[in-house]
Amino acid sequence: MNKRYSLHHIHSADEFTFSPAEYSYFKYGDKSFAEKFAKELFEGFISEHEEILNTDKEIVVLPSPYMAIPTASNFLCFYFKKYLDFYLFQKGKKSSILSKINRNHTYTTDYGNLSFEDRKNLIANDTYYLDKDYLRGKLCIFIDDIKITGSHEYTVNKILAEYDVEADFLFMYYAELMNFDLDPKIENYFNYYAVKNVEHITEVMTKPSFQFNTRIVKYILGLDSSNFEYLTSKVTKEQMDNLLELAISNNYHLIKEYENNINTLTKTELYYGY
């Protein structure tokens, strides 16, 4: 089995069945919307395809690939698992298992501005790893927030084929672009709908439901010095400590575009390392 399910279908550039503002906040670290979207996604899926879960196979859920810093879809996946596990509990079945597709590289390019070919070429320079033996014979649910060109799904399917993984695969999305006459850059229309500048970033970071993800870490590290100084003056030292730890864990200190802000974090002793 290799199937796909998406809750919201994008047919036009100005009418949507989900909130672009909520999606934008979600993409920049507001976990409250990750949970909201996950609940909606699970309920939508169950209402249409409950029979897929009527299986004796173990269920594995996997977010979109990442290195060390989780993507926004990782939080969507985490909360989806919460609702899935409660459903399985009610059915007297085993809980699902959270797994991961590892990646070895990162990039500064704004993915939402790329075409399918550009996205595919960018991903082709990356290295992905999954445990093919562990996934064998299971129902594997790959969860992502949005499908625009399908480049990630294409890449994951390619890896599964190369590894000869024998299992059932379900690709699940909160939203999917159905009208391919629309420019793929519509993804950034959603990404930046409510979060357009450093002031908006600081507003998101002051919410109790905030947690760093790949997108917001890259955004902050790419700020010019004046905007970076503004942000650091508005958020907590603990958050900046966490930011530096995450940046180092993802090897962002080796990326020239991020050097200045990482060095600023270190020089101002916002982080006490070894």
Image (cartoon, rainbow, N blue to C red):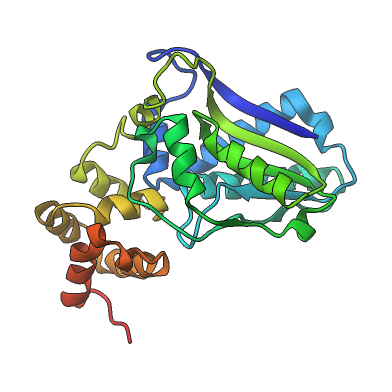
Quadrant containing the C terminus is bottom left
Quadrant containing the N terminus is top right
Left or right: 23 in relation to 49: left
Residue at point 32%, 53% (across, down): 218
What x and y, as percent, mark residue 76?
55, 44
Q: How many marks?
A: 0
What x and y, as percent, mark residue 227?
14, 51
Q: Residue furthest left?
A: 226
Image height of 269 relative to 161, above or below: below
What x and y, as percent, mark residue 191?
36, 34
Image height of 154 relative to 129, above or below: above
Left or right: 187 in relation to 138: left
Q: Residue furthest right?
A: 56
What x and y, as percent, mark residue 100?
62, 56
Between 221 and 34, the one lying in front of the other is 221
Image height of 110 relative to 46, above or below: below
Residue at point 71%, 60% (across, down): 131
